[in-house]
Amino acid sequence: MVLFFTSTAIDPPATIYMGKDKHENEDLIKYAWPQDVWFHVDKLSSAHVYLRMPESIESWEKIPQALLTDCAQLVKANSIEGNKKDNLTIIYTPGKNLKKTGDMAVGQVSFHSDKQVKRVHVPKRENVIVNRLNKTKEEREVDHEQERVDREKKESAIRKAAALKQRKEEEELAKKYSDEKAARDYSLLDVDPNDEEARRNAQEMMDDFM
């Protein structure tokens, strides 16, 4: 089971999720979206909390402070030891930076690049924030494999649409350049570009010179 929370720290709201136990964390590590952001209490046991990156945020390094605080507070609240302590450090990194090897314990994770790990300081527990998030909590079964297939299909469609748009823009630009060049050529020959017969004769004349 996966626990979902809604953060209203930004508009539109953002989705935060975490595994119910360490075994669910294994699936989340395996199926985390590359652009999702993983949060954990530094050097202490805690829940693995993920932020589903909103499309409105340019990159994981530019998460608004209010949303960052929501994620950090949720991690702290879901750490048995960390919840009792002040002045904690929360680490976070993109899902694509998570590294799992066969010799690691259940729920354990490392990173492909330590340079891709950022830190945020949490002075103390903020009950107002934690209570607000807990009121939105939903527990749901997730078909991780199907979710990945659906995501990859959507991302593929977006890439194809972007490529089609770019190709269309390039073709339009090439046609515009060709039309402008032809207009200049007709102008040099004193030909009305709207006179089809005159243009055809001019084109034949230019072809003879090539």
Image (cartoon, grey):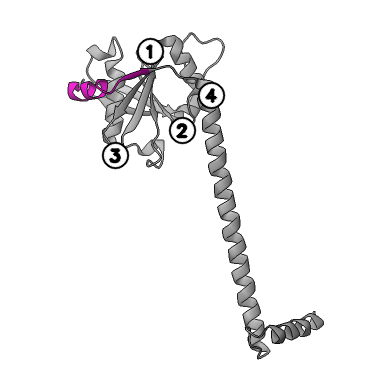
The residue pinned by badge 2 equals 35
| Amino acid type, callout 3 | Asp
- Measured as percent of width and height from the top left, residue 72 is found at 30, 25
When asked about the image quadrant of residue 73, the answer is top left
Q: Residues within 10 Å of mark 2 (few under 14, many from 20)?
A: some
The residue pinned by badge 1 equals 20
Q: Which residues fall within the magenta stretch?
A: 126-139
The tag on residue 11 is 3
Q: Is residue 199 above or below residue 50?
A: below
The residue pinned by badge 4 equals 146
Q: CA distance from mark 4 to mark 1?
A: 20 Å
Residue 77 lies in the magenta-colored region? no
The residue that appears at 46% across and 33% down in the rendered structure is 35
Q: Secondary structure at mark 3?
A: loop
Q: Is residue 157 above or below residue 146?
A: below
Q: CA distance from mark 3 to mark 4?
A: 28 Å
> Going by the image, does 79 lie left or right of 106?
left
Counting residues from the start of the chain, the first of labels 3 and 1 encountered is 3
Question: Is residue 197 or residue 16 the one in the foreground?
Answer: 197
Counting residues from the start of the chain, the first of labels 2 and 1 encountered is 1
